[in-house]
Image: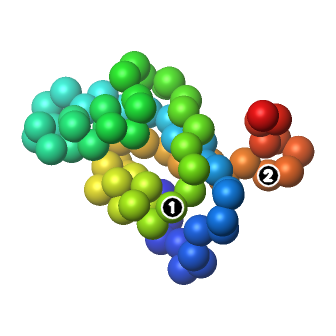
Amino acid sequence: MTQSTTAPIEGARVRITLVKSPIGYNQRQRDTVRSLGLRRLHQVVEQKDSAVLRGMVDSVSHLVRVVEPTADTAVKE
């Protein structure tokens, strides 16, 4: 993930994909991946964008990929 200088937009969502196994990394990083809702490789979860979420993603940025859905790719709820 690249550093974002913009603040999260209220109500915005991000898609997070686990692209590398946390096996071999310390327990804290494995716990962070798990708390993001990721259990399997290539699993995609959609979370509300927040400063807390950005911090978690930043700490495991070498294991995950983040995509900010655009209006045409956003999941309808």
The secondary structure type at the circle numbered 1 is loop
Amino acid type of the residue tagged 1 in the rendering: Ser
Q: Which colour scheme is used?
A: rainbow
Q: Residue at x 47, y 71 (%)?
A: 3
Can see residue 58?
A: no
The secondary structure type at the circle numbered 2 is loop
Q: Residue furthest right?
A: 72
> Residue tagged by mark 2?
70
Can see residue 3?
A: yes
Residue 65, given in percent of the width and then of the height, sits at 50, 44
What mark, if any, has residue 50 been given in the picture?
1
Residue 72, given in percent of the width and then of the height, sits at 88, 45
The answer to whether residue 17 is above or below residue 65 is above
The answer to whether residue 27 is above or below residue 69 is above
Q: Which of 48 and 3 is in front in this view?
A: 48
Q: Which of 42 and 72 is in front in this view?
A: 72
The answer to whether residue 39 is above or below residue 65 is above
Q: In this view, does 56 lie to the left or right of 54?
A: left
Q: Residue at x 85, y 51 (%)?
A: 71
Which mark lies nearer to you, 1 or 2?
1
Q: Is residue 75 left or right of residue 12?
A: right
Residue 36, given in percent of the width and then of the height, sits at 39, 39
Amino acid type of the residue tagged 2 in the rendering: Thr
Q: Which residue is drawn at 54% across and 80% down?
A: 5
Q: Residues within 10 Å of mark 1 (few under 14, many from 20)?
A: some
Q: Which residue is drawn at 66% across and 65% down?
A: 10
Where is residue 29, by image quadrant? Answer: top left
Q: Residues within 10 Å of mark 2 (few under 14, many from 20)?
A: few
